[in-house]
């Protein structure tokens, strides 16, 4: 199981209210006791933070607010001592506008080597006053910004599929490809165990730069044929990267953020000579309904089996509303989230847990406008709430904010007062807490031969019940409905033993609504 750490919100060691790498290092024991196998760190590179570090100014260093290269080395070393692997975020679609390459591009002339590293184009219309096409930014507004040339005249336009501070690189450029291959080696030589690839489906763009037709969305899962998402040429990049990681010991791993419309398109990224794993967004986006969840599982398992790649499952991350809230919030959302966790952790393949998920944290929906930092909130004048609500710092201990997050009492985003009931300290001693549920589930996931990789077989159990068997001798039952349900006949044998449940099961053996149960069978 891989645990996602959003570094600025995990643990603050120096009291500035922002999480940092020494803070992560101080909590490695917690991660090991949770049952984590690997940690994925959000970007910690030098950055002006126009998009929370996904605007990288230097790919070979650490932003001082998060620590230093020495802190990275110490974290990797100590994590390995705890038996934890370290995966770092890599952002190859775009750089920061403060990256030395982009500063050089702005100072250079059209057609220059410096501009060829990015996607600069002449504008349309009289005097080039209109953008090269109608592409829009994921964060609102145009995906093009016009520059002022050295002679102070209006000049070319550059592409940024996100903020203007995140200019897109041109991946047909050999310098760009060589630079990122060098970056991979830099971090592999320091001992990292893999990379999470941001916007992995976005590197290649249609060279004709056609206008975006009405049936192609700016963001979200990409439909096949989209002019700037999921272009086939992107696979050449990942074949070259795979050749690099295959030359290092320890089996370094890639995990890709790939937003595509079908599991079949996702599978193309996971062919034997490309990336190792990719996030399963069809499962994450599935509503709390048995039919939809089963379809997401079946389609994913079938598509990835064709390329002999493991499935990966995820319920929340730093870009989506936390699933307690997505599933309805309050007590219903919490019950469903706990059941979904046992469903996810019983499926074949890998699983990702986003920090705070194991505490049952909710989306913080009432953040004051003045503290919000997500560019999507600001570029849409508040029409989009943005992603700050799932990035609020973790509650570790105590009765009052910041709940042990920072020694100074500071926190870059405010925490709700009612998180006092959800702190790690409070939950560690509660046998019924969500933290205890995750710890028990991850312990069983390590101990039971049936869990991890391998096959699953569905058991027909009614319209609102998901049930499946995994060998040897394991059955998972999830009641997605509201009324109690009888477990399927496969479970009712005299030798069936309840291993773990997301909510108490009565003496009659029926599984309550919004509840999951794990059984050992003969």
Image (cartoon, rainbow, N blue to C red):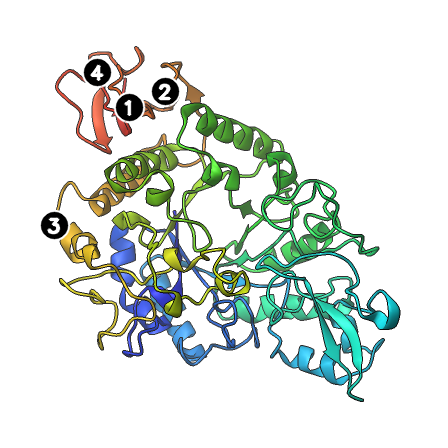
Mark 3 closeness class: few <14, some 14–19, many ≥20 residues within 10 Å = few
Mark found first going from the N terminus, 4 or 2: 2
Q: Is residue 247 visible?
A: yes
Which residue is identified by label 1? 482
Residue 62: x percent and y percent?
A: 47, 77
Secondary structure state at the residue bearing disc 3: loop
Mark found first going from the N terminus, 2 or 3: 3
Mark found first going from the N terminus, 4 or 1: 1
Secondary structure state at the residue bearing disc 1: loop
Q: What residue is at 64 percent from the left and 42 percent from the top?
A: 271
Q: What residue is at 61 percent from the left and 42 percent from the top?
A: 260
Q: Which mark is residue 495?
A: 4
Which residue is identified by label 3? 429
Disc 1/disc 3 C-alpha distance (Å):
29 Å
Residue 493 left/right relative to 476: left
Mark 4 closeness class: few <14, some 14–19, many ≥20 residues within 10 Å = few
């Amino acid at each position: 199981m891989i645990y996602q750490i959003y570094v600025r919100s995990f643990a603050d060691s120096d009291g500035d209210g922002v999480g940092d790498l020494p803070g992560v290092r101080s909590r490695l024991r917690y991660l090991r006791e949770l049952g984590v196998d690997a940690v994925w760190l959000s970007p910690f590179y030098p950055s002006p933070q126009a998009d929370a570090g996904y605007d990288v100014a230097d790919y070979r260093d650490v932003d001082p607010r998060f620590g230093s290269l020495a802190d990275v080395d110490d974290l990797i070393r100590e994590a390995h001592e705890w038996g934890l692997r370290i995966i770092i975020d890599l952002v190859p679609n775009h750089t920061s506008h403060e990256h030395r390459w982009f500063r050089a591009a702005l100072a250079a002339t059209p057609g220059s080597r410096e501009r060829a590293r990015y996607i600069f184009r002449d504008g349309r219309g009289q005097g080039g006053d209109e953008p090269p096409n109608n592409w829009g930014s994921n964060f609102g507004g145009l995906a093009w910004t016009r520059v002022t040339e050295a002679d102070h005249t209006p000049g070319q336009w550059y592409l940024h599929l996100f903020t203007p501070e995140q200019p897109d690189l041109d991946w047909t450029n050999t310098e760009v490809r060589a630079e990122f291959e060098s970056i991979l080696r830099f971090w592999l030589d320091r001992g990292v165990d893999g990379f999470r690839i941001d916007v992995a489906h976005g590197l290649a763009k249609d060279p004709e730069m056609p206008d975006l037709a009405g049936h192609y969305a700016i963001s979200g899962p990409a439909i096949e044929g989209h002019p700037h998402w999921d272009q086939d040429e992107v696979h050449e990049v990942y074949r070259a990267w795979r050749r690099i990681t295959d030359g290092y010991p320890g089996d370094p791993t890639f995990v890709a953020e790939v937003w595509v419309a079908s599991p079949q398109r996702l599978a193309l990224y996971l062919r034997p000579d490309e990336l190792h794993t990719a996030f399963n967004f069809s499962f994450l986006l599935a509503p709390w309904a048995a039919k939809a969840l089963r379809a997401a599982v079946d389609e994913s398992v079938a598509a990835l089996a064709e390329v002999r790649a493991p499935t990966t499952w995820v319920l929340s991350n730093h870009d989506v509303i936390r699933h307690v809230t997505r599933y309805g919030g309050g007590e219903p959302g919490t019950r469903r989230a706990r059941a979904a966790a046992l469903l996810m952790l019983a499926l074949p393949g890998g699983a990702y847990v986003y920090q705070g998920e194991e505490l049952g944290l909710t989306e913080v929906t009432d953040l004051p406008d003045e503290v919000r930092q997500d560019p999507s909130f600001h570029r849409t004048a508040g029409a989009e709430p943005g992603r700050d609500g799932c990035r609020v710092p973790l509650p570790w201990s105590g009765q009052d904010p910041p709940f042990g997050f920072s020694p100074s009492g500071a926190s870059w985003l405010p925490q709700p007062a009612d998180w006092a009931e959800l702190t790690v300290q409070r939950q560690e001693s509660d046998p019924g807490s969500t933290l205890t549920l995750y710890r028990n589930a991850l312990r069983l996931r390590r101990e039971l031969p049936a869990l991890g990789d391998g096959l699953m077989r569905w058991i027909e159990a009614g319209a609102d019940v998901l049930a499946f068997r995994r060998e040897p001798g394991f059955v998972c039952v999830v009641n997605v409905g509201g009324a109690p349900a009888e477990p399927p006949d496969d479970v009712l044998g005299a030798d069936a033993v309840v291993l773990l449940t997301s909510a108490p099961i009565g003496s009659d053996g029926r599984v309550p609504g919004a509840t999951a149960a794990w059984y050992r069978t003969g």
